[in-house]
C-alpha cells in the first residue's frame, strides 16, 4: 500500500505538464516572472499587486478546474525541481537535516497536492442535499465557490509547508492568494519570492516579503480570506485587522500540547515516539509534545527510556549529530535557555549560542509555577510533571488553555476513551505523537486559544470556499400556504410539518 502511494507520488513528482495545457503561454519556468518580485518596502507596489490579483480573479482566470489542476501541477513541479534549493535555504535558516525537511515539509505538501488534484472534481461539484417536504416541489444543492483573493501569512518553523499547504487549498478552491512568508526564515522567504513566480501564475499568486511593517500594510488591505499561521499575540492583531473589513479568518496558532502517559502505556515505545515528536526540527513544531504528565511511580522508568531514545536517535553528542537541527535565531535561543532550570535538568541541558544549539533536554521535578510552564516551549526542552494518575492529568490539562494537540499513551482502551471524552484539543494522536496532522482526511486546526478554522484535504478546500446554498423551486405550482391573506388553516397546515 505504501509502495503504491509512493509510486503515485513519484508520478506526480516527475509530471511535466504539457505546455499546451498551460493557460499562461508567456510564462515559462526559466524566464523571469511577468510581474517582478515586490519591493515590500513600497506599499504602493503591494497594493498594486493585490489589485492585479483581484482583477484576475474577477475576470475569472482561476475558475476553471483545468486551470486549478495546472497550477497544482506547477506547484508540484516547483517542489520537485527546486528541492535542492529549498533544502539549502531551510538548512541556512534552521540547520535542519534534509530528511526532516522532506518528511515534515515537502512530502506532506506533495500529498496535499496529489489529494487536491485527485478529488478536485468531486470537491468542487454541487453537493446535492435532500429537500424536505415543506419546500417541495424543489431541489437543493450546496455549491462551493471561490472566495476571491486570500492572504496567507506563514511562520518560520516550517517555512515552506506552512505557506504552500494552505496555498494548495486556496488554488484548489479557485482563489488567488497573496503569500507572506516569515521574515525570520529569510532565505526561504527570498527563495519563494524569487522562484515560485517562475512556476505559478505570478499575477494570481504574488509573494510579498517582509516583517511587521510590510505585514501591517498588507493587513490594511481588503482580502476575501486571511489564513494566518503563527503565535497568538500576532493572531490577535490579524483578527483585529480582519474585523475592519469583516474578513473571514483562519488562525492556526500554537499552545502547550500535553502528553499523558498512563500507567498502562508501553513505556519504551512511548518514549521513542515522544522523543521523535519532541525533537524533530529541534522541537520547533507547533504540535510537538510540550510537556509530559506521568504518575510518580512510572516517572523514573519513563525518563530512563526517554534518555535511551535520545541517545539512540542522536548519539552521545547531539550537537555532532547530522539528525538534529538548530534554533531559528539568537532571540529564541536566549528565550529557550532561560527556560532550562539547571537544578531540574534530568538529561541534556547543554547550549552553544554561537551554533544556536540547545541539546535535547529533559526537565524533571517541574511544577506549574516554573518558567517552562508559563509559555509554549517551541524548542528542544521537554518538562516532565508528575501527577497522581490519569484523572489527575485530565484535571491538569483542563485547567489550562485548550491545546493544539494532545497525546495519550495507554494500552487501556477505557483510559484512551476517558481522556478523549473529558478533554479538548485541536487534535489527538493516541499512542504516538504528531501523526494526526499527517492524515489528509482529517481537519488540522486548533480550538479556543490554539486557533480557529482548519485545513488539509477537503477541509482546506472548504475553508477557502463559500458553500453557497442554492434552492431551485418548480414553477408548475404555487401553493399559497405562506402568503397573505394569513389564515388559521395556513397556520395549522404549517404545523403539520413540525
Ligand atoms: P513568526 O514570528 O514567523 O510570525 C508569523 C507571521 O506573522 C510572520 O509572517 C510575521 O511576519 C508575521 N508577524 C509578526 N509580527 C507581526 C505583527 N506585529 N503584525 C503583523 N504580522 C506580524 O512566527 P511565530 O509567531 O514565532 O510562530 C511560532 C508560533 O506559531 C508558535 O506559537 C507555534 O505553535 C505557532 N505555529 C502554529 C502552527 C499551526 O499550524 N497551528 C504551525 C506553526 C507554528
Image (cartoon, grey):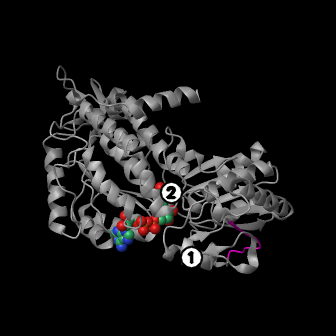
The percent position of residue 242, horizontal first and vertical second, equals 30, 63
Q: Residue at x 41, y 64 (%)?
A: 185
Residue stretch rendered in magenta on the structure: 361-368
For disc 2, the marked residue is: 447
For disc 1, the marked residue is: 353
Mark 2, Cα crowd under 10 Å, few <14 / some 14-19 / many 20+, is: many
The percent position of residue 249, horizontal first and vertical second, equals 35, 57
Residue at the far front in the pictured view: 320
Q: Is mark 1 within 8 Å of ligand 1?
A: no
Confirm whether the magenta stretch covers residue 363.
Answer: yes
User: Residue 118 or 73: which is nearer the viewer?
Assistant: 73
Q: Secondary structure at mark 1?
A: helix
Q: Secondary structure at mark 2?
A: loop
Relative to residue 4, is residue 302 drawn left or right?
A: right
Q: Nearer the viewer, mark 1 or mark 2?
A: 1
Relative to residue 185, is residue 285 drawn left or right?
A: right
Q: Earlier in the sequence, mark 1 or mark 2?
A: 1
Where is 43 relative to 222, above or below? below
Mark 1, Cα crowd under 10 Å, few <14 / some 14-19 / many 20+, is: few
Task: Report whether residue 324 is seen.
Answer: yes
**Measured Cα–Cα span from mark 1 to mark 2:** 35 Å
Which of the 4 image quadrants contains residue 193? Answer: bottom left
Q: Residue at x 44, y 49 (%)?
A: 454
Q: Is the C-beta separation of discs 1 and 2 under 8 Å? A: no
Amino acid at each position: 500500500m505504501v509502495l503504491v502511494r509512493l509510486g503515485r507520488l513519484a508520478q506526480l513528482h516527475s509530471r511535466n505538464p504539457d505546455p499546451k495545457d498551460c493557460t499562461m503561454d508567456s510564462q515559462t519556468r526559466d524566464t523571469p516572472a511577468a510581474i517582478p518580485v515586490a519591493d515590500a518596502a513600497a506599499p504602493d507596489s503591494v497594493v498594486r499587486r493585490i489589485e492585479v490579483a483581484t482583477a484576475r480573479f474577477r475576470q475569472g482566470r482561476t475558475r476553471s478546474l483545468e486551470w486549478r489542476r495546472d497550477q497544482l501541477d506547477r506547484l508540484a513541479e516547483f517542489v520537485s525541481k527546486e528541492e535542492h534549493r529549498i533544502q539549502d535555504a531551510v538548512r541556512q535558516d534552521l540547520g535542519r537535516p534534509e530528511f526532516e525537511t522532506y518528511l515534515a515539509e515537502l512530502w506532506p505538501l506533495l500529498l496535499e497536492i496529489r489529494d487536491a488534484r485527485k478529488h478536485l472534481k468531486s470537491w468542487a461539484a454541487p453537493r446535492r442535499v435532500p429537500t424536505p417536504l415543506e419546500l417541495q416541489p424543489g431541489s437543493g444543492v450546496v455549491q462551493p465557490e471561490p472566495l476571491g483573493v486570500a492572504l496567507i501569512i506563514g511562520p518560520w518553523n516550517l517555512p515552506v509547508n506552512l505557506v504552500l499547504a494552505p496555498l494548495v487549498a486556496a488554488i484548489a478552491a479557485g482563489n488567488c492568494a497573496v503569500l507572506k512568508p516569515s521574515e525570520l526564515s529569510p532565505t526561504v522567504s527570498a527563495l519563494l519570492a524569487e522562484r515560485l513566480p517562475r512556476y505559478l501564475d505570478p499575477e494570481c499568486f504574488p509573494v510579498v516579503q517582509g516583517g511587521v511593517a510590510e505585514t501591517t500594510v498588507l493587513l490594511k488591505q481588503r482580502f476575501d480570506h486571511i489564513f494566518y499561521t503563527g503565535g497568538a499575540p500576532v493572531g490577535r492583531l490579524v483578527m483585529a485587522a480582519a474585523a475592519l473589513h469583516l474578513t473571514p479568518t483562519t488562525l492556526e496558532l500554537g499552545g502547550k500540547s500535553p502528553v499523558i502517559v498512563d500507567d498502562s502505556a508501553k513505556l519504551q515505545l512511548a518514549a521513542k515516539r515522544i522523543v521523535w515528536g519532541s525533537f524533530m526540527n529541534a522541537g520547533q513544531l507547533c504540535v510537538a509534545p510540550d510537556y509530559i504528565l506521568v504518575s510518580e511511580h512510572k516517572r523514573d522508568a519513563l525518563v530512563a527510556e526517554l534518555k535511551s531514545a535520545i541517545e539512540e536517535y542522536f548519539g552521545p553528542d547531539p550537537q555532532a549529530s547530522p539528525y538534529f537541527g538548530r534554533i531559528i535565531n539568537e532571540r529564541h535561543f536566549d528565550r529557550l535557555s532561560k527556560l532550562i532550570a539547571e537544578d531540574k535538568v534530568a538529561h541534556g541541558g547543554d547550549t552553544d549560542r554561537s551554533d544556536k544549539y540547545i541539546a535535547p533536554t529533559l526537565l524533571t521535578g517541574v511544577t506549574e509555577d516554573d518558567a517552562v510552564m508559563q509559555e509554549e516551549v517551541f524548542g528542544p526542552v521537554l518538562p516532565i510533571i508528575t501527577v497522581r494518575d490519569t484523572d489527575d492529568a485530565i484535571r491538569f490539562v483542563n485547567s489550562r488553555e485548550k491545546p493544539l494537540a494532545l497525546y495519550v499513551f495507554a494500552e487501556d482502551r477505557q483510559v484512551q476513551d476517558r481522556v478523549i471524552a473529558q478533554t479538548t484539543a485541536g487534535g489527538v494522536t493516541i499512542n504516538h505523537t504528531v501523526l494526526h496532522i499527517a492524515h489528509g482526511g482529517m481537519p488540522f486546526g486548533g480550538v479556543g486559544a490554539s486557533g480557529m478554522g482548519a485545513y488539509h484535504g477537503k477541509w482546506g478546500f472548504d475553508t477557502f470556499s463559500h458553500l453557497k446554498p442554492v434552492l431551485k423551486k418548480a414553477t408548475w405550482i404555487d401553493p399559497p400556504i405562506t402568503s397573505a391573506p394569513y389564515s388559521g388553516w395556513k397556520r395549522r397546515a404549517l404545523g403539520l410539518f413540525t
